[in-house]
Image (cartoon, grey):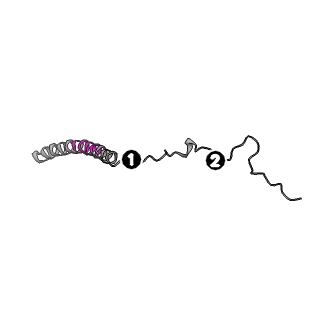
């Protein structure tokens, strides 16, 4: 006798609908955005980017000041 075949037909009390997507897929449902929402999101992203760049610039300027002070000390000797 051959291998038994599993009956894939739904039995009593079973639905034919596929199971709902699970959270482990890691993706949210896609929601269409209006053009206004898209532009506002772009503005927010740009503001965040500018803030990050300003912080980076402040850090680099402090580093430059330290190096310039070291240069003055080296030139004085």
> What is the count of numbered marks?
2
Mark sitting earlier along the chain (1/2): 2
Query: Residue 18 has which mark?
Result: 2
Q: Quadrant of the C terminus?
A: top left
Q: In this view of the protein, which residue sits in the foreground, 13 or 39?
A: 13
Q: Is residue 57 magenta?
A: yes
Q: Nearer the viewer, residue 40 or 74?
A: 40
Q: Which residue occupies the foreground of this view, 73 or 37?
A: 37
The residue tagged 1 is: 33
Kindly give the residue lying farthest to the bottom in the view shown: 2
Under tag 2, what secondary structure?
Answer: loop
Q: Tell me if 37 is positioned left or right of 15 in this view.
A: left
> As drawn, is 40 to the left or to the right of 17?
left
Residue depicted at 44% across the width and 46% down the height: 31
Residue 75, percent from left and from top: 11, 48
Quadrant location of the N terminus? bottom right
Cα–Cα span, label 1 and label 2 = 28 Å
Q: Which residue lies furthest to the left in this view?
A: 76
Dividing the picture into quadrants, the one containing residue 13 is top right
Q: Is residue 72 rendered to the left or right of residue 39?
A: left
Is 76 in front, or is 66? Answer: 66
Above or below, 4 against 64 in this view is below
Q: Whole-percent x and y of residue 28?
A: 49, 44
- The residues colored magenta run 47-58
> Callout 1 environment at 10 Å: few (<14), some (14 to 19), or many (20+)?
few
State the image coordinates of residue 43 (x, y, percent, origin top left): 28, 45
């Amino acid at each position: 006798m051959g291998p038994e075949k599993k009956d894939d037909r739904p039995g009593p009390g079973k639905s034919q609908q596929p199971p709902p997507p699970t959270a482990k897929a890691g993706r949210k449902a896609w929601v269409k955005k209006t053009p206004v929402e898209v532009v506002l999101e772009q503005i927010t992203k740009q503001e965040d980017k500018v803030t990050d760049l300003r912080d980076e610039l402040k850090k680099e300027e402090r580093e430059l000041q330290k190096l310039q002070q070291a240069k003055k000390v080296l030139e004085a000797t």
